[in-house]
Image (cartoon, grey):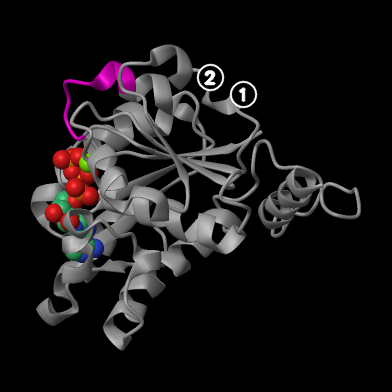
Amino acid sequence: MARVHVIANQKGGVGKTTVTVNLAAVVADTLGGSTDAPPVLGVSTDPQASMLEWANRVGDALPFDFEQCHDNPALLSKLRDIDRYAHIFVDTPGSLEDESILRTVLAQADDVIVPLEPEPMSFSPAARSIQRLVVPLGVPWRVLLNNWDPRDGEADLTQTREYAAARGWPCFNTVVRHYKLHTRASAEGVTVVQYAKNRVALEARQDFFKLALEVLGGQGGTARHAAVSANGDPANDATVGVYGVNAGEHAREA
Ligand SMILES: Nc1ncnc2c1ncn2[C@@H]1O[C@H](COP(=O)(O)OP(=O)(O)OP(=O)(O)O)[C@@H](O)[C@H]1O
Ligand SMILES: [Mg+2]
């Protein structure tokens, strides 16, 4: 069974689609698998379908399978039953209007990633989504600071971390920095794994690889549906996610 990661925040424009596409891309690229049977499915539940447009522009180079599902609640409520993939990354709408879609898909989540921009206008809307929709689920969730521009200095970042800490919000260590490359990627039809191999592009890409390591192996950790470890024992907390993925990979290749 797949592990379902839902990227959610009802505030618009915080980076849900950017994070979903690039996280799915680095996980798919790293886990390998064949083009016929990629290990990752990306799902968009946003009626605005910006992930669909992006995926279409990437075309055959997209390293994961993709489904646009906003009008398919039956499928959305069965994401966990899909057994072809090791991981499913789900993009969600950035508005209050489509809350029923969001609730349906959150009920399928093994963990939730809440992107947040390091600026005060973003805080209250994120807090509402977290308190009303995410915390009540009882699954692991973490806030992801996204779109921080180091040229603006550390003040906004520190303030955002303090705000999160004061509310007891768990945060990823990884901060996804602002890069023009990310802003242009959708229009140019690339994901982070197709960026050119120059220093800036490698740095931009690194944030998503670090994030993937935290998502797959970190404290968000014990995958609800993880397979047992290679030696047949349930793995300990630190390794179950990683071994679960590997075991699934080998099983599919076999
Ligand atoms: N780390 C980043 N670096 C540069 N640009 C970014 C970054 N994250 C997001 N952006 C840009 O910010 C804008 C909003 O991002 P995105 O569309 O991913 O947000 P969203 O939460 O999915 O929005 P919506 O709620 O409208 O669906 C886009 O133009 C995107 O390219
Ligand atoms: Mg979006």
Q: Quadrant of residue 148?
A: bottom left
Q: Do the residues labelled 2 and 1 touch (CB within 8 Å)?
A: yes
Query: Where does the magenta region start and end?
Result: 94-101
Q: How crowded is mark 2: few (under 14 residues within 10 Å), some or many (20 or more)?
A: few
Instruction: Determine the residue positioned at 50% across, 26% down.
Output: 108
Q: Quadrant of residue 45?
A: top left
Is 243 covered by the magenta stretch? no
Instruction: Determine the residue positioned at 89% across, 48% down.
Output: 233
Q: Which residue lies furthest to the top in this view?
A: 74
Kind of element beneath mark 2: loop
Q: Nearer the viewer, residue 122 or 254?
A: 254
Please name the residue that numbered disc 1 is placed on: 81
Q: How crowded is mark 1: few (under 14 residues within 10 Å), some or many (20 or more)?
A: few
Q: Which of 3 and 168 is in front in this view?
A: 3
Instruction: Determine the residue positioned at 44% across, 51% down.
Output: 24
Is 96 covered by the magenta stretch? yes
Q: Where is residue 172 in the image (x, y as percent from the top left)?
A: 41, 60
Kind of element beneath mark 1: helix
Q: Where is residue 41 in the image (x, y as percent from the top left)?
A: 49, 40
- For marks 2 and 1, give the CA distance: 5 Å
Q: Where is residue 125 in the image (x, y as percent from the top left)?
A: 17, 38
Query: Does the beta carbon at disc 1 come under 8 Å from ligand 2?
Result: no
Q: Which of 76 and 195 is in front in this view?
A: 195
Q: Which mark is residue 51?
A: none
Looking at the picture, does residue 166 appear above or below residue 251? below
Q: In the rendered structure, which amino acid carries the disc numbered 2?
A: Lys
89 left or right, relative to 95: right
Please name the residue that numbered disc 2 is placed on: 78
Looking at the picture, does residue 4 appear above or below residue 55? above
Q: Could you tell me what secondary structure mostly forms the magenta stretch?
A: loop
